[in-house]
Image (cartoon, grey):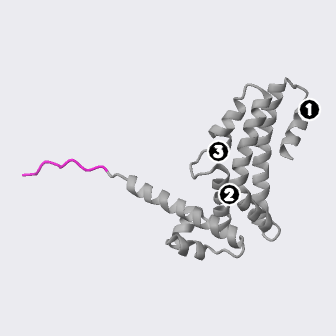
């Protein structure tokens, strides 16, 4: 005689996901501190793993390379957290684009730039300094600058709209001014 099948219990991965998120956040915080204090070249994955209380394997599993870890540290510094939401979709940047006038947009953008600069300048300086000696970091810096230029292009379009500017050369001038 066969026994009735017991209903299977569903696997709940939330605690594993939470632990992975906490490990990722810890790695990013430690890497940010060490890169900022010692520079990119002088900071090893072994040091980061040891200070985070994790294995080197865990660090590489989460970030695949030291360069990719640096990119994520910079991204986190720029946006202020580890959520996978790009800067242009954040409330502060949405507020810039939603501003009713150019003056309002300028004020909101200035506030946002101050916040981003306070969080991100130190680690961006690490990227910039390491780019001279490491071609992978130089490529990362070019990629970051390309992203920034794209974002500045969106801002220029917003300002051009608020100022009723339609001449492409004038819009490019706005973009270049914001870039500088």
Q: Is residue 128 left or right of residue 177?
A: left
Residue at numbered disc 3: 86
Taking the image as drawn, is residue 110 in sight?
Answer: yes
Please name the residue shown 41% across and 58% down the image.
Answer: 16
Q: Is residue 70 left or right of residue 175?
A: left
Rendering coords of residue 147 (x, y %): 75, 47
Residue 13 image label: none
Taking the image as drawn, is residue 65 in sight?
Answer: no
Residue at numbered disc 1: 170
Q: Residues within 10 Å of mark 3 (few under 14, many from 20)?
A: few
Q: Are marks 1 and 2 in contact (CB under 8 Å)?
A: no
Residues rendered magenta in the picture: 1-10
Q: Secondary structure at mark 2?
A: helix
Q: Are marks 2 and 3 in contact (CB under 8 Å)?
A: no
Q: Distance between the Cα atoms at labels 1 and 2?
A: 32 Å
Residue at numbered disc 2: 74
Rendering coords of residue 6 (x, y %): 18, 49
Quadrant in which residue 159 is drawn:
top right
For the view shown, which residue lies furthest in the top direction? 164
Quadrant in which residue 158 is drawn:
top right
Residue 53: in magenta span: no
Q: Secondary structure at mark 3?
A: loop
């Amino acid at each position: 005689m066969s026994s009735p099948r017991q209903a299977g219990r569903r696997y709940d991965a939330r605690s594993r996901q939470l632990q992975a998120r906490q490990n990722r956040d810890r790695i990013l915080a430690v890497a940010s501190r060490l890169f900022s204090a010692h520079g990119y070249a002088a900071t090893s994955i072994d040091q980061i793993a040891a200070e985070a209380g994790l294995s080197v394997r865990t660090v590489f599993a989460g970030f695949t390379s030291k360069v990719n870890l640096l990119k994520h540290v910079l991204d986190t510094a720029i946006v202020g957290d580890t959520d996978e939401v790009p800067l242009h979709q954040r409330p502060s940047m949405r507020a810039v684009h939603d501003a009713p006038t150019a003056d309002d947009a300028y004020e909101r953008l200035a506030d946002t730039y101050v916040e981003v600069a306070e969080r991100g300048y130190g680690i961006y300086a690490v990227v910039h300094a390491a780019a001279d000696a490491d071609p992978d970091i130089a490529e990362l810096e070019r990629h970051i600058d390309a992203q920034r230029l794209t974002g500045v292009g969106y801002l220029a379009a917003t300002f051009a709209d608020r100022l009723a500017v339609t001449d492409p050369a004038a819009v490019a001038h706005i973009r270049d001014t914001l870039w500088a």
